[in-house]
Amino acid sequence: MKKIIFEIETITPMFVAGANQTKAELRAASIKGLLRFWWRALQAEADLNKLREKEAIIFGSSEEGVGGSSFSLRIITKDDLKPIKNKFPSNPQHQVRVEGKTFKINILEYLAYGTYEYIPRQGNVFVREYYPEKTKFDIVLNFTDEKGKNEVLKAFYVWCIFGGVGSRSRNGFGSINVINMEKAFENIGTIFSAKNPYEKQNLNRLIKDNGIVSYPSFTQGARLFKAKQSFRVGLDALADVGKIYKNGRSTLEKKHCFEKRQYIGSPIVEKKVTKSFLDRHAKPYFIKIAKESNKYRAYILYLPSRYCDGLEKDRNDLTINHSNVDKKFAEVCNEFNRFLAANMETVI
């Protein structure tokens, strides 16, 4: 049995939970689910039946005759994990003005929306525990099948450089750093670079030549944007890119208009009324805070897809015109990408 240990350190607050959503709990099943997601993104497979067959060999399936996973995953904590509910730092540089209002909000709270409640005279108070920055733990992978090992490691690699752990991870929370990056990924060292993961030459190896598929994946059209400035504190890097992200969404259309913004992420709710035609659609953008030497830099990854393949009706029970919806989705993302390119550096 081949064992690989990943030494992990959190860069931004990590909102993870089990059955009780208010209590912080780091679960191996959640990490395995993330590996599935990023493995699929790397495949960019249009044939979903083929995708499921390949996935079952690596990650296991409950279907008869398929068998279990080719690897096991467990989490080892360095010290007792200590979740907190502390307010985020009240740094003046984190404050942004609300459109049409005279007051300002903490951009970090904007990105963490849904993890707190507003209480009069106290402001936004977290109802969900989180693990703070610099929380350390190990992820241990034990492989029972050598054939799937590199596939899992490649998924782990892209998850570490682009994704996060827990709620609001697409908004940059739960970003992690693999302390022993080179040793952990030595098995795929000839495929991807552990030293320079964000170099264009390395990233181009991720991209498949095939067209857009039904789920977010590394197909032609994938983009990565890099913040122009690095920071000594991870939350400062997140606040900086959060402002860019918020401004980008705001410039798509006028206030109280949601035709475009719903394609960046749904639902959109105004005054307790849902304005988007889908109840939920995860955004195709992934904010990542990366540790580079002794500083932190933000990245935004865009993974293209078709909008809602397989869904016949919208939340209002109206038939979805997929051709029109996919066209609009691509147009809005292209517009948003142009904004990101103007305010960040384009890597790919």
Image (tube, grey):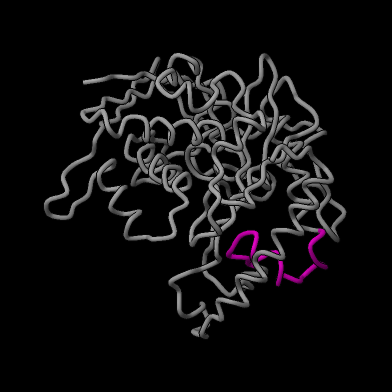
297 shown above or below 64: above
The question of residue 166 being in magenta is answered with: no
Q: Residue furthest bottom?
A: 318
Q: Is residue 191 above or below residue 332?
A: above
Task: Give the camera-side residue of 249 and 154.
Answer: 154
Where is residue 262 drawn, in percent x and y?
Answer: 65, 66
Residue 266 in the magenta stretch? The answer is: yes
User: Residue placed at 41% from the left, 20% from the top?
Assistant: 6
Q: Nearer the viewer, residue 72 or 323?
A: 323
The quadrant of the rendering that contains the N terminus is: top left
Residue drawn where x is 23% and y is 44% of the image: 60
| Residue drawn where x is 54% and y is 39% of the image | 206
**Residue that lies at the very extreme toward the left in this rendered image:** 65
Rendered position, 91 above or below 340: above
Q: Quadrant of residue 45?
A: bottom left
Quarter of the picture containing the C terminus is: top right
Q: Is residue 56 above or below residue 139?
A: below
Q: Is residue 101 left or right of residue 4?
A: right
Question: Chief secondary structure of the magenta span?
Answer: loop
Left or right, 262 with respect to 257, comes to left
Residue 180 drawn at (x, y percent)? 48, 14
Q: Is residue 155 left or right of residue 255?
A: left
Image quadrant in which you'd find residue 133: top right
Magenta part of the chain:
251-269
Depth check: give the residue in front, 88 or 194.
194
Expressed as whole percent of the image width and height from the top left, the position of residue 9 reads 51, 21
